[in-house]
Amino acid sequence: MTAKRGRGDRVVWSSERGGDQRSPRSRPRDEAQVEAGDGVVRIRRETRGRGGKTVTAISGIPLAGDELADLAKQLKRRCGTGGALKDGVIEIQGDHRDTLVAELEGRGYQVKRAGG
């Protein structure tokens, strides 16, 4: 038997039991894997932890990897500003909620404004 042990002497991988023995929550996410959410794209404005600067965060887009990065690039270009893609959340610099809601609805996504 080949086994790797994690913290607390728990078996985290075993060749006899079919590989990864960790719980689904503690397993690293595969970038190609898209979680089946509720199908709603959420757009919210964030300022916390950014030195007072405003960022528009877009989450829940059912795309993975390169497709999500391409969409982020197109949305940044549409708003004429910078941004980033972090952990499946697109962050656009500034408050562009109205523009992004219209753009994503035009692309066929169901969009909701989240937060205040």
Image: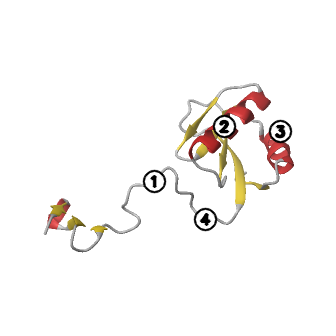
The residue lying furthest to the bottom in this view is 17
The circle on residue 99 is 3
The residue labelled by disc 2 is: 70
User: Under tag 2, what secondary structure?
Assistant: helix
Camera-near label (3 vs 1) is 1
Please state which of the two labelled residues, at mark 3 or mark 2, is closer to the viewer. 2
**Residue 10 placement (x, y as % from top left):** 19, 68
Is the C-beta separation of discs 1 and 2 under 8 Å? no
* Residue appearing at x 22%, y 67% in the figure: 15
Q: Earlier in the sequence, mark 3 or mark 1?
A: 1
Question: Disc 1 or 2, which lies upstream in sequence?
Answer: 1
Q: Answer left or right for 19 relative to 51.
A: left
Name the element at disc 1. loop
State the separation of the CA atoms marked 3 and 1: 31 Å
Residue appearing at x 39%, y 55% in the figure: 28
Closer to the camera in the image, 43 or 22: 22
Cα separation between marks 3 and 2: 18 Å
Q: Would you name the residue on which mark 4 appears?
A: 36
